[in-house]
Image (cartoon, rainbow, N blue to C red):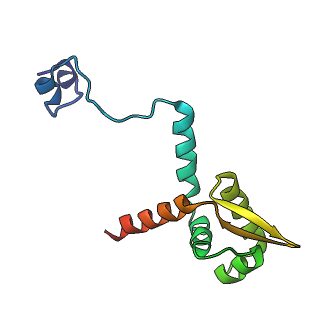
Amino acid sequence: MTEKAAAGGCHCGAAETKGAASAPDLPVIQDEDELADLAELFKVFGDSTRIRILVALIERGHCVCELADGLGLTQSAVSHQLRILKQARLVRSRRSGRSVRYVLADDHVRTIIDQGRNHIGE
């Protein structure tokens, strides 16, 4: 039995087959800034209102009032969530005269939503 197993650590026996001195070869993110940014990105996806807005923007852009009416939210609530989505670089705005339309920032956002929906549908 390895020292870890004897001390209440790993009980799977992997260390015995690979040698007690070798650590498992796991993929890791070494850059702490990258790790923090990735965690922040996934936090943004943790709000159902923001997901509803992102899904509404998949096919085409919308202004705040269209999103508010279509989703049954106040314009203030939509604006607040859009600000968070813009800060996370998930949406961008396009000004056309006095109107501002919001669109998904790029195809990655659509892919993340599609993959998430596929995952929960399994």
- Residue drawn 54% across the image and 37% down it: 34
The N terminus, quarter of image: top left
- Residue drawn 22% across the image and 27% down it: 8
Total count of labels = 0
Locate residue 117, reporting x and y percent: 42, 68
Q: Is residue 100 left or right of residue 108?
A: right
- Residue drawn 55% across the image and 61% down it: 109
Q: Which image quadrant for residue 36?
A: top right
Locate residue 38, reporting x and y percent: 53, 44
Q: Relative to 105, is 75 above or below?
A: below
Of residue 60 and residue 69, the one placed in the foreground of this image is 60
Q: Is residue 62 left or right of residue 121?
A: right
- Residue drawn 23% across the image and 20% down it: 22
Q: Relative to 38, is 46 above or below?
A: below
Q: Is residue 34 left or right of residue 57?
A: left
Locate residue 23, reporting x and y percent: 26, 24
The C terminus, quarter of image: bottom left
Residue farthest along the right direction in this orientation? 98
